[in-house]
Image (cartoon, rainbow, N blue to C red):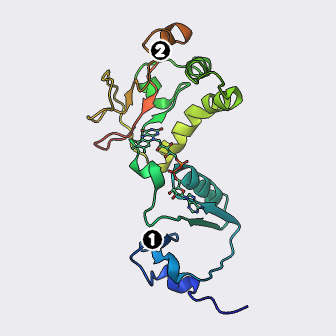
């Protein structure tokens, strides 16, 4: 096999940085695509992308102790996740909901999402999402995502440091008849505070 034009070490050092190409873990700079004629590496888990889905998978795989290689095709890390408002629709009795005195259940969350998912809702996925939602929230808190134990009745994305609000139309008819209205928009506080 011929020698690769760029060795892994050279990539990690960020040679040829400055334009779109390949990003590696711990690497701040990108390598131009046209400078990469061949490249190889070995890993147990390869994660393509660096958005929230990819990073979640990479974190969990790494926690299991297996080597993980995460690659991103764009020169910026984070995908659309990094551009998002960071609102996570969570419920079923998250720690933040309980702290705010809101009682939520898997069944209510399921009825709300299923009722707002158009004519062909993926009910099994929705059920699982609702069942695991409170645990997912705990997972993010354990990772260090800062939430404040504060609720706002403001309808739009909170500009204060509140972390819980009604991000959907839970209070509006007919949703309010189908499921008990509960705020489920979980967003990191603008000013950091411990949960
Ligand atoms: C402005 C904005 C605000 C939003 N706000 C919210 C919000 O508040 N709450 C909410 O729930 N949702 C929000 N969304 C939607 C949410 O951001 C997306 O649904 C979510 O980020 C998708 O995550 P993902 O990990 O699946 O994909 P992405 O975050 O898009 O990540 C995919 C990554 O994979 C990379 N990639 C693709 N193919 C390859 C490949 N072959 N090799 C290597 N890398 C590859 C892409 O370049 C990209 O970086 C918002 C979206 C936008 C645009």
Numbered disc 1: secondary structure: loop
Residue at x-position 61% and y-position 53%: 57
Residue at x-position 57% and y-position 33%: 133
Q: Can you identify the residue that label 2 sits on?
A: 181
Residue 25 is situated, as x and y percent measured from the top left of the image, at 52, 69
Q: In front here: 164 or 167?
A: 167
Q: Which of disc 1 and disc 2 is earlier in sequence?
A: 1
Q: Residues within 10 Å of mark 1 (few under 14, many from 20)?
A: some
- Which quadrant is the N terminus positioned in? bottom right
Q: Where on the picture, by quarter, is residue 194? A: top left
Q: Where on the picture, by quarter, is residue 105? A: top right
Q: Would residue 11 appear left or right of 157 to someone viewing this image?
A: right
Numbered disc 2: secondary structure: loop
Residue 16 is situated, as x and y percent measured from the top left of the image, at 44, 83
When the figure is inspected, residue 106 is found, relative to residue 84, above or below; the finding is: above
Q: Can you identify the residue that label 1 sits on?
A: 20
Question: Disc 2, disc 1: CB below 8 Å?
Answer: no
Q: Where on the picture, by quarter, is residue 67? A: bottom right
Residue at x-position 48% and y-position 10%: 176
Residue 27 is situated, as x and y percent measured from the top left of the image, at 46, 73
């Amino acid at each position: 096999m011929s020698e690769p034009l760029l060795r892994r070490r050279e990539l990690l050092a960020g040679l040829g940085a400055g334009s779109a190409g390949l990003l590696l873990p711990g690497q701040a700079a990108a390598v131009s695509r046209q400078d990469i004629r061949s490249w190889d590496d070995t890993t147990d888990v390869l994660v393509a992308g660096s958005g929230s889905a990819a990073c979640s998978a990479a974190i969990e795989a790494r926690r299991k102790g297996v080597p993980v290689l995460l690659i991103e095709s764009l020169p910026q890390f984070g995908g659309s996740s990094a551009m998002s408002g960071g609102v996570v629709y969570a419920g079923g009795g998250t720690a933040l909901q309980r702290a705010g005195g809101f009682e939520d259940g898997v069944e209510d969350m399921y009825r709300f999402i299923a009722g707002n998912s158009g004519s062909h809702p993926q009910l099994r996925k929705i059920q699982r999402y609702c069942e695991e939602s409170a645990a997912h929230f705990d997972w993010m808190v354990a990772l260090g995502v800062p939430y404040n134990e504060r609720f706002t009745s403001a309808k739009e994305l909170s500009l204060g440091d509140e972390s819980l609000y009604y991000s959907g139309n839970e209070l509006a008819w007919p949703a309010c008849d189908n499921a008990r209205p509960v705020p489920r928009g979980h967003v990191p506080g603008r000013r950091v505070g411990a949960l």
